Amino acid sequence: MEGWADGPEFVTQCPIRPGESYTYRFTIEGQEGTLWWHAHSSWLRATVYGALIIHPKQGESYPFTNPKRETPILLGEWWDANPIDVVRQATQTGGAPNVSDAYTINGQPGDLYKCSTQGTTIVPIDSGETNLLRVINAALNQPLFFTIANHKFTVVGADASYLKPFTTTVLMLGPGQTTDILIKGDQPPSRYYIAARAYQSAQNAGFDNTTTTAILEYKSAPCPSKGVATIKPLMPSLPAYNDTNTVTAFSKSLRSPRRVEVPTEIDENLFFTIGLGLNNCPPNFNSNQCQGPNGTRFTASMNNVSFVLPSNISILQAQHLGVQGVFTTDFPTNPPLQFDYTGNVSRSLWQPISGTKVTKLKFGSRVQIVLQDTSIVTSENHPIHLHGYDFYVVAEGFGNFDPKKDTSKFNLVDPPQRNTVAVPVNGWSVIRFVADNPGAWIMHCHLDVHIGWGLATVLLVDNGIGLLESIEAPPEDLPLC
């Protein structure tokens, strides 16, 4: 993706002002399947999002049975309030934001909420059909389980990369992730609930425990008997909210369709801890501003650095124009202090430093990043998204990553290619890619509450002669601060 067409506020551009516009121009290379677009400013993406579907080139076909029909399934999250007010209140108090009131499928909560049965999303199918569902988790803060009553489905792609097909009855998608599935109309013609609800891995943390539904409706379903408004759909069973075993089994089933070119020699070997933290209450704050645990304020970090966005120029603009003082290039590429990451962590390590620190990567370098969850405050499954790149997920596991024994578990043959990896709760993931796309690329947790607390960093990739020469000048309509 061209560097100026990425979109995160204060990373590659300033926010688009009310009433203004900006045209994103980019070239699609090597991707087929389902992506999505969304706002990248505060919590605006709670409602500003949509599917971005990449079909095979003209004259080419899918590497699976051509579906009779295709249906995007966008999983969302809804507050009975302005989401901006929700996050502003949390920022003022230092506490956790209020959890959502509902989840949605294609904008509709579904039959299990008191307000919305008239608008429940209907997904059509007919007996004998094979249809393609493009499932997108656009929820703001919640990984979600997804299933369909009485139906199995075949997973064929994720994050606009094809996968080796496998059959399952349940998906888990972290926010930001997409999964393409084939479903067959092989059940008795009727109505079946499509359902999604939370995968909640953080202990003692509040979450929205409601269930959103749509209806898979066979066109040849029998008409309801006289005096009955509709045939009640069959309800599927969903995994328990904390069913990490199902999540692990699903993620370990993901493989590329064939052997892929994974970097085997590594130039940049990085290790990023990811997790929460608590800031002590600043002296000039009152107790209403420090409503986190024991009078603190919630925060989050990578390698003990809580990322702070600039406020009057983007990082890419500052680099391009040579503006000093906007960011520093001293983000630690390894934890500043080694500790038992998933054990009982000393309270002295719960408060990170804050700063606008980036990591410089040489253009063309072969990069490995170990993403290690920590148990600071609470361990959690973190969907980590890297802008500007797809990467191979070569391994995942639980506990602390140990290069001596865990390197032997790496899949360097057919690992899945993704742009968002769900780092296991109390565990780790290892990703590899070649840094061949110049620009300023944010890497962040896709739980928006966490990116707001600072769980992010920026990878600055140039070609050795500087970003000024390696990317084009900014477009004339690029938003300015």
Image (spheres, grey):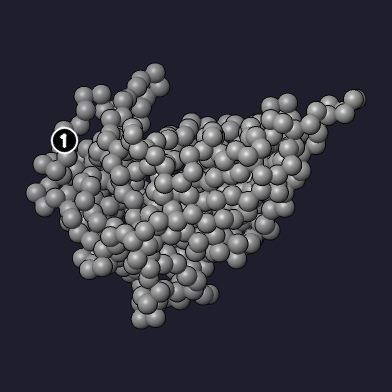
Q: Is residue 446 left or right of residue 353?
A: right
For the N terminus, the quadrant is: top left
> Residue 269: x percent and y percent?
27, 67
Q: Quadrant of residue 15?
A: top left
Q: Nearer the viewer, residue 34 or 450?
A: 34
Q: Nearer the viewer, residue 70 or 6?
A: 70
For the C terminus, the quadrant is: top left
Q: Is residue 24 above or below residue 63?
A: above
Report the residue at 63% width, 51% height from top.
152
For the image, the number of numbered tags is: 1
- The extreme right residue here reads 227
Q: Quadrant of residue 85?
A: top right
Q: Is residue 84 left or right of residue 221?
A: left
Q: Is residue 443 above or below residue 55?
A: below
Report the residue at 10% width, 41% height from top.
469
> Residue 299: x percent and y percent?
47, 54
Determine the secondary structure under disc 1: loop
Decide if residue 157 is in sight here.
Answer: yes
Decide if residue 326 is in sight here.
Answer: no
Q: Is residue 27 above or below residue 431?
A: above
At label 1, the amino acid type is Glu
Q: Nearer the viewer, residue 283 or 340?
A: 340
> Residue 364: x percent and y percent?
18, 55
> Residue 150: x percent and y percent?
71, 49
Q: Is residue 311 left or right of residue 177?
A: left
Report the residue at 25% width, 38% height from top.
2
How many other residues sit within 10 Å of disc 1, few (<14), some (14-19) or many (≥20)?
Answer: few
**Residue beneath disc 1:** 472
Q: Quadrant of residue 372?
A: bottom left
- The extreme top residue here reads 19
